[in-house]
């Protein structure tokens, strides 16, 4: 999302160039992603083209590992279930 944005909407509703904020946005994204969070960027614009959009912010989803998941996976393997995990 960030690569196709050239402006950012601030909390007060003002719209400013994104360049002075890009590094902190990238750091925030990297930090939350490295914590195992799902990070979705939001942007909008008046064009049908995916360019020159206005960045709004991130939605952050947390999906922690469930307790006792190692036991559940072991039980599944013993029962002949092949576990496949697809992400991305």
Image: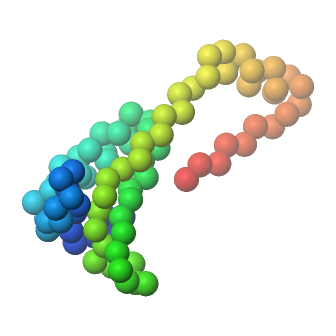
Q: Is 19 rendered above or below residue 35?
A: below
User: Which residue is pictured at 67% across the width and 21% down the height?
Assistant: 69
Q: Nearer the viewer, residue 15 or 33?
A: 15
How many numbered discs, if any?
0
- Residue 71 pos. (x, y %): 72, 16
Residue 51 visible in rendering: yes
Q: In the image as oriented, which residue stretches furthest toward the front?
A: 12
Question: In the figure, is residue 7 to the left or right of 61?
Answer: left
Q: Residue at x 34, y 75 (%)?
A: 45
Query: Residue lying farthest bottom?
Result: 48
* Closer to us: 47 or 37: 47
Quadrant containing the N terminus in the rendered view:
bottom left
Find residue 70 and report its image quarter: top right
> Visible in this render: residue 22?
no
Q: Residue furthest right?
A: 79
Residue plotted at (22% across, 72% down) = 6
**Against 6, is 86 above or below?**
above
Q: Residue 84: x, y in percent?
A: 72, 42
Residue 10, given in percent of the width and then of the height, sits at 19, 55
Taking depth in this image into account, of 39 and 15 the one nearest to the observer is 15
Q: Which quadrant of the view contains residue 52?
A: bottom left
Can you give x and y, in whole percent of width and height, for residue 40 in the image?
Answer: 43, 52
- Drawn side of residue 79 relative to residue 69, left or right: right
């Amino acid at each position: 999302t960030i690569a196709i944005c050239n402006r950012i909407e601030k909390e007060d509703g003002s719209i400013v160039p994104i360049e002075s904020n890009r590094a902190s946005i990238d750091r925030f994204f990297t930090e939350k992603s490295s914590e195992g969070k799902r990070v979705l960027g939001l942007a909008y614009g008046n064009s049908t083209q995916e360019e020159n959009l206005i960045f709004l912010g991130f939605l952050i989803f947390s999906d922690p590992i469930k307790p006792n998941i190692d036991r559940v996976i072991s039980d599944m393997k013993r029962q002949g279930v092949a576990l496949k995990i697809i992400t991305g």
